[in-house]
Image (cartoon, rainbow, N blue to C red):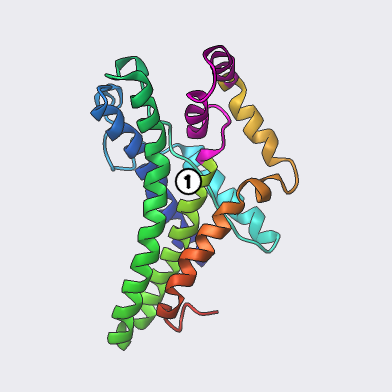
Amino acid sequence: MTDLVLALPILLFSVVAHEYAHAWTAYRQGDDTAHALGRLTLNPLPHIDPVMSVLFPIGLWLMTSAAGHPFTFGAAKPVPVDPRKFRDYRRGDLIVSSAGIITNLLLGAACAALFAVVGIVGGAAPGLERALGTVQRMLVFGVSINFTLAVFNLVPIPPLDGSHLLYHLLPPAWGARYRHLGRFGFVVIFAAFLVPGLWNVVLWPVDVLSVGALTLVRDFALPSVVR
C-alpha cells in the first residue's frame, strides 16, 4: 500500500503532463479549443477523470498486487482538439498527436536522471538517506509509468495517439474508414485487456526502456532502495 501512495502522485502528474502537451501544441498550431475550456494548465483539477485517474489505477494496483505483480496505469480526461483550426492540418495533427508521447518519454528519462542526482545528494548527506530513498522509489515508478504511457499511446487503435500517426500513412480512402473505427476504439481496447498475455507482448518496449534507463543509474541507488 505504501508503494501505491508513492505511485499515484507520479501517475497523476504524468497523465496531466501528457494532456497539457496536447493542449499546448494544439494552441501553438492554431487551435484554441483547450485553452478556451481551461485545459491549457498543469493544474490537475480540470484534467482529472474520477474513474480513469483515481478508481481504475487503485483497482488495477490492488488486483495486480494480489497476483504478486503490483502495477498501475490510468489516464486523464482527453483534451478537446479541433484539427480544422490548425494552420496546417497534417503537420498540426502529427505534432499534437505525438506531443503527449514525446512528453512521457522525456519525463521517463528525466526521472532516471533525477534518480542519479538524488543518489548523489543522499550519498553526501547520510542524514537524508531514508527520505531520499523514498524519493528514489517514486522516481522508479516515474520511469516505468511514463514509458508505459508513451508506449501504450503509440498503439494504433483509435482514438489513441498512435492511430493519428498511422492515419497519415494510409491512402485517403483507407484512412477515412480507419478513423471511423474510433467509435468502437475503447471497446476494442477494453476487450484487448481481457486477452491473457496480449498486453505483455504489446508493451514489451516498456521493459526494455525501463530496465535500460534504470540500469544506467543503478550505481546511484541508495541502500534503502536496493531490495
Q: Which residue is outermost to the right?
A: 196
| In the displayed structure image, the side of residue 71 where residue 218 appears, left or right | left
Based on the picture, tell me whether residue 155 belongs to the magenta stretch. Answer: yes
Task: Describe the element under mark 1 as helix, strand or loop.
Answer: helix
Instruction: Out of 51 and 196, give the one closest to the viewer.
Output: 196
Q: Looking at the image, which residue is at 46% across and 75% down? A: 218
Where residue 185 appears, as percent x and y from the top left, is 59, 26
Q: Is residue 143 above or below residue 132?
A: above
In the rendered image, the quadrant that contains the C terminus is bottom right
Name above or below for residue 202 compared with residue 139.
above
Q: Residues within 10 Å of mark 1 (few under 14, many from 20)?
A: many
Task: Assign the magenta stretch its main secondary structure.
Answer: helix
Q: From where the camera sits, is residue 39 visible?
A: no
- Taking depth in this image into account, of 183 and 206 the one nearest to the observer is 206
Q: At 41% from the left edge and 36% from the top edge, which residue is drawn?
A: 98
Q: Which residues are magenta?
A: 153-181
| Residue 202, x across and y down, in percent | 63, 45
Residue at the image point whose x is 65% and y is 62% from the top: 69
Which residue is labeled 1 in the image?
150
